[in-house]
Amino acid sequence: MTSATRLIVTGTAASPRRRRRFSLSSTVVILLILAVLGLAVFPFYWMLVTATSSDTALYGGGVQGLPDLTRLGVFGEVLGSSDVLLWLRNSAVIAGGTTVCTLLLAIPMAYGLSRFRFRGQAVVGIGLLVTQMLPEALLVVPLFAIFSRLGLLNSFAGLVLANTAFALPIVTWVLKNAIDTVPVDIEEAARVDGASRMGILFRIIVPVTAPTMAATAVIAFFHGWNEYIFALTFLTDVGLKPASVGLAGFVGEITTPIQTVMTVGVLYTLPAVALYLILQKYIVGGMAAGSVKG
């Protein structure tokens, strides 16, 4: 047998082993992905199971592993007998306002940090990071005093400003890193054609970094949607309550309607999950572009 024949036979015999190894590694990866996905989805699934459970199934000795689809009417009952729709609308207004204000402020700030060199630039960047070290609970009293003097208590405007202040630093940094990846030559060519700085920003930079814009929009939206401390402190009008505060109101000192809490929790979670699924492909690409400097 010649050396060429041995090589062919050896390669042919080894290829099934490689395929088996590849198949085994792929199976392990798939199982790990499914396990992580299961851990992420399980809390939402368990809320649905608890929301559709009867008192007997909930407080009995057994464990109900599947949702009772015959009891899906509890969602209609909760929507008709409480202010859940009003709370969800308020949360949408707060989250939407936070998203718009954050992007309007973060886009020019990120562009300035990326394209201009000025004295104190490093201090500004570090200052943005330092703000992320301050917990919201630490600033409730100072902000309450400031908003009281400015007449921003018990209004969506004050809450949007407070949420924007906390979402702005991280959004600015992610956008800055994304703008760093855009070649400066494109801007120079646009300036030769007579484009202004603002024209370059909104006609070139924003479209090119659109996936990162979508990712940062989701970050700002989730911050406004999930915020609780400021909403509980700054809003006293019952009609202005967001869903986060309204949901906590079901928890009583003596009894807590578990099914109602879980039903409202499912309704409160669905819009955020739907938004994430719609923008998922933009979020993955945008976060990757905004985390690596080219």
Image (cartoon, rainbow, N blue to C red):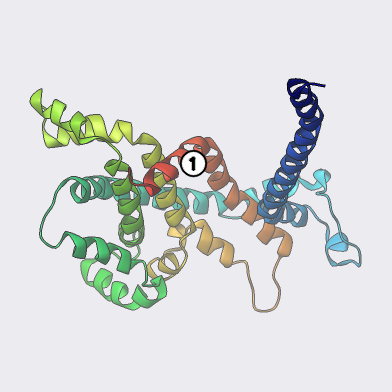
Of 237 and 17, nearer the camera is 17
Q: Is residue 64 left or right of residue 158?
A: right
Q: Position of residue 208 (x, y in %)?
A: 32, 32
Helix, strand or loop for disc 1: helix
Number of residue marks: 1
Image spot of residue 264 (x, y percent): 63, 55
- Relative placement, left or right, of 35 versus 241 is right
Q: Position of residue 186 (x, y in %)?
A: 21, 29
Q: Residue at x 46, y 36 (%)?
A: 282
Q: Is residue 61 above or below residue 39?
A: below
| Callout 1 amino acid | Val
Residue 76 higher or lower than 139, as above or below: above
243 with respect to 79 (left or right): left
Image quadrant in which the C terminus is located: top left
Judge the density around disc 1: few (<14), some (14-19), many (≥20) Cα neighbours within 10 Å: some
Is residue 194 in sight in this rendering?
Answer: no
Q: Residue at x 78, y 32 (%)?
A: 14
Residue at 35% over, 50% down: 174
Horizontal relation, residue 211 to residue 30: left or right: left
> If the image is split into quadrants, where does the N terminus sit?
top right
User: For the view shown, which residue lies furthest in the front direction?
Assistant: 2
- Is residue 289 visible to us here? yes
> Residue at point 76% right, 41% down?
27
Residue placed furthest toward the right: 61
Residue 191 position in % (x across, y down):
11, 29
Above or below residue 198? Residue 9 is: above
- Residue ID for mark 1: 284
Q: Quadrant of residue 161?
A: bottom left
